[in-house]
Image: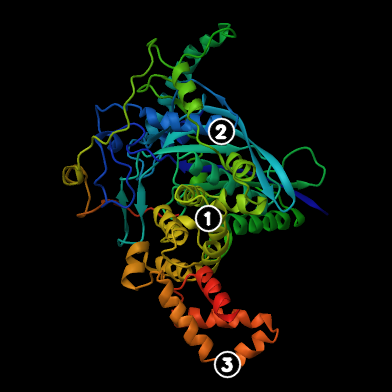
Amino acid sequence: MSWETVIGLEIHAQLSTKSKLFSGGSTQFGAESNTHVDLVDMGLPGVLPVANKEAFFKAVRFGLATGAEINQISSFDRKNYFYPDLPKGYQITQMTKPIVEKGSIKVITDDGEKIINITRAHLEEDAGKSIHDLFEGETGVDLNRAGTPLLEIVSEPEISNAKEAVAYFKAIRQLVTFLDICDGNMAQGSMRCDVNVSIKKSGDKELGTRAELKNINSFKFIEKAINYEIERQIRVIENGDSVIQETRLYDSEKNETRSMRSKEEANDYRYFPCPDLLPVVISDKELKEIKDNLPELPEEKEYRYISKIGLEKSEAKIISSSKTMANMFEEASSKTDDTKLVAKWLVGDVSALLNKDNIEIGESNLSPENFGKLIERITDSTISGKIAKSVLEEIWESGSDVDEIIESKGLVQIKDESLLEEIAKKIVDSNPDQVAAYKGGKDKLFGFFVGQVMKETQGKANPKSVNEILKKILS
Amino acid sequence: MDKKTVTTISYLSRLKIDGENEDKITKDLQNIIKFVDQLNDVNTSDVEPLTSPLEKTAKTRKDQVTAKNLKKELLKVAPSTNEDYFLVPRVVE
């Protein structure tokens, strides 16, 4: 029997505001435990939440960029459950009226393009963190994260396989980082996702019973968890049993999903309107201002790079793939007229280093400013392209400043033409056989002389000058 | 609203109901719901759901950090802590 898979994703993106959704507590990551906790985050008696408007603006940006409907009047509901890292005993969320509804995003996989519809994106507050493995018989609670604004982005159940789910997640991540509403840092938990998976017989209209997979925080695990779950559900059904609707935890060490029965008991969240909060309104003026100031998105950048700057499609695609990469390109392009050279470096040497280390550009030691300076030093002839490669490698390791590397290692290009002439003459004089062969018609030997001069100068000669000088001497 | 629902809700709200009170509370809740159910007789098809009885909209905050570090004070009011965390009976998935 053949089966079809139906997948829907709920992505939680931490909005990059300075302060929390309903309090003046800091959202800074990695701070000492329980130092960024406001009285509101603690849920102490007598405090009232006050909404952080910036979080709403960021959510609206997402809505506009996905062609969604924006609900200019936002209201809030309480989702009730007990867990130690949720001090109030409820989470403030948007059940009845999400700020964003009915958007969509284009996803590209090996099978081509596909539009995935976004049911809704709503604002809610994050919970704190429970630390289970530090204490004997007890759980520690750090409330620094409690109250951090999240945008929960819910897709329609339209995703057909694990690869497509990963592509969708990547597209959302690319979008939120370009919009500057979330840093997209998966390792720090700035983006997390729950995956709803069900299977049905091929051609069936009705959806099968779904399982919700929790605790997935990397692209690799999304794919593995979904594939495991699909196989499990097929096995269950082919054994004559039926899939039950439940929450399952993905265990990346064992590569399996297992039932979280404890969650099932508490599955009734008893939503009701939050009496502490009045509706938050986005005015027409604010909406227009956000619309007018939407940043250029990946597709628009790609198009501009091809049509206005004249990059190849393949180059434009790589460069517009991430915000940091695009920043590198634009920063360096502002330092030189030779934008094609900038593109060549990013697509060539920089991408090669990224592939070698299997990291994204944002995780590397290379900053847009430093990269811009590197290109500037090539175009103003301070260093040769060859030296620039070793400088790039040095930055890759240490993150040091381009000029400092050039100075401390004495890499400045030899500009003294008479010195180059002297070296070139010496090379020619000490290789009479090659000179004779060259003059006898072996043109290819010219490269040998250039190579020798570059070797003698430790790569610090400008290849163009060397070419000219050698041509003069050998003619 | 039967006894089983009352048991479930009391568990979800972490409210302990004594066995002898269970019948009385179930009956009370049934009556309350019956009373409130009268609202279903009103035709509300043209009425926007009300999120708050105050016909006002929210004042909002600018995105600024205003909280002080209250770690010591906050940990002090909790029943069980160490120098860094609030401590609770072990929660395991």
- Residue annotated with mark 2: A65
Quarter that holds the C terminus of chain B: bottom left
Q: Position of residue A63 (x, y in %)?
A: 54, 30
- Residue annotated with mark 3: A432
Task: Identify the amino acid type marked 2.
Answer: Ala
Front of the two marks 1 and 2: 1
Front of the two marks 2 and 3: 3
Which of pointers 2 and 3 lies earlier in the amino acid sequence? 2
**Which residue corresponds to the image point at 48% horizontal and 22% vertical from the top-left?**
A287
- Crowd rating for badge 2 (residues with CA inside 10 Å; few <14, some 14–19, many 20+): some
- The correct choice, above or below, for A288 with respect to B15 in the image is above
Residue A15, visible in the rendered structure: yes
In the displayed structure image, the side of residue A386 where residue A41 appears, left or right: left
Q: Mark 3 lies on which chain?
A: A
The circle drawn on residue A283 is none
Q: Position of residue B89 (x, y in %)?
A: 32, 52
- Residue annotated with mark 1: A342
Give SS at disc 3. helix
Q: Position of residue B79 (x, y in %)?
A: 21, 46
**Marks 1 and 2 on same chain:** yes
Give SS at disc 1. helix
* Most foreground residue, A115 or A415: A415
Front of the two marks 1 and 3: 3
Task: Identify the amino acid type marked 1.
Answer: Val
* Distance between the alpha carbons at the discs numbered 1 and 2: 29 Å
**Which residue corresponds to the image point at 52% horizontal and 9% vertical from the top-left?**
B38
* Distance between the alpha carbons at the discs numbered 2 and 3: 68 Å
Q: Which chain carries label 1?
A: A
Which of pointers 1 and 2 lies earlier in the amino acid sequence? 2
Q: Which chain carries label 2?
A: A
